[in-house]
Amino acid sequence: MAKRYYELHVAGCTRQLPILNISDTLAIAGFVILGDTEIVTRTAEELAKKVPEGTDIILTAETKGIPLAHEMARALGMKKYIVARKSVKAYMENPICVEDESITTMGKQRLYLSQDDVDLIRGRKVLLVDDVISTGGSMKAMKEITEKAGGQVIGEAAILAEGDAAKREDIIFLAPLPLFEAE
């Protein structure tokens, strides 16, 4: 059980996030949107207002970005969004793949798109969406798979920008999220 908490204020919501050690020197505030319909709905509505003009489709990676991408697509009147999967599923024909490293995922992981998703992306302007941008590893992998599929990344959006990511001017986000020293 966490001993420390960070109070987050975003899109009219307040949450107490547990501060969790991820190494001997670094700790992060655990931000999980899965199951939190209020924060997903409110942040999706706020992010939808910032979506670059000309965006054709939204792409997210499994898992935590899925409810956000869903709500953003709904708010924007999009009938579909795309999820880059972390493993090949039986229904995926001719999948393409890239490797990803993330601050919250141990080791390397892979992202996959099926041929159907590649066909939806090819020649289109794609907004990359995730819950948090930190080191940028997940966004880099999503950008790589978008380009491999023949799409053009038009922007990168997240609810929170963690650590130094909050200083970036090339991403869309609603609030900064600090990093912490491990205890």
Image: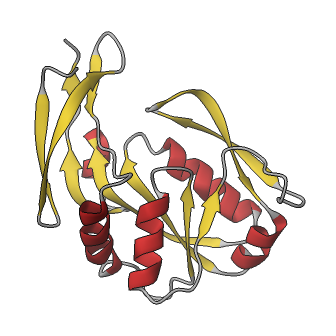
Q: Residue at x 44, y 82 (%)?
A: 74
The single residue placed furthest to the right in the displayed view is: 94
Q: Position of residue 18 (x, y in %)?
A: 20, 31
Q: Position of residue 65 (x, y in %)?
A: 46, 56
**Colour mode of the rendering:** secondary structure
Above or below, 183 relative to 96: above
Q: Residue at x 72, y 44 (%)?
A: 87
Disc tally is: 0
Is there any visible trace of residue 156 in the rendered image?
no
The N terminus appears in which quarter of the rendering?
Answer: top left
Is there any visible trace of residue 56 in the rendered image?
yes
The C terminus appears in which quarter of the rendering?
Answer: top left
Q: Residue at x 30, y 56 (%)?
A: 36
Q: Quadrant of residue 145?
A: bottom right
Q: Residue at x 61, y 49 (%)?
A: 141
Front-most of residues 81 and 97:
81
Q: Position of residue 165 (x, y in %)?
A: 32, 47
Above or below, 175 relative to 122: above
Front-most of residues 34 and 119:
34
Q: Quadrant of residue 149?
A: bottom right
Above or below, 78 relative to 88: below
Q: Position of residue 79 (x, y in %)?
A: 57, 86
Q: Is residue 158 left or right of residue 1?
A: right
Q: Is residue 15 left or right of residue 132?
A: left
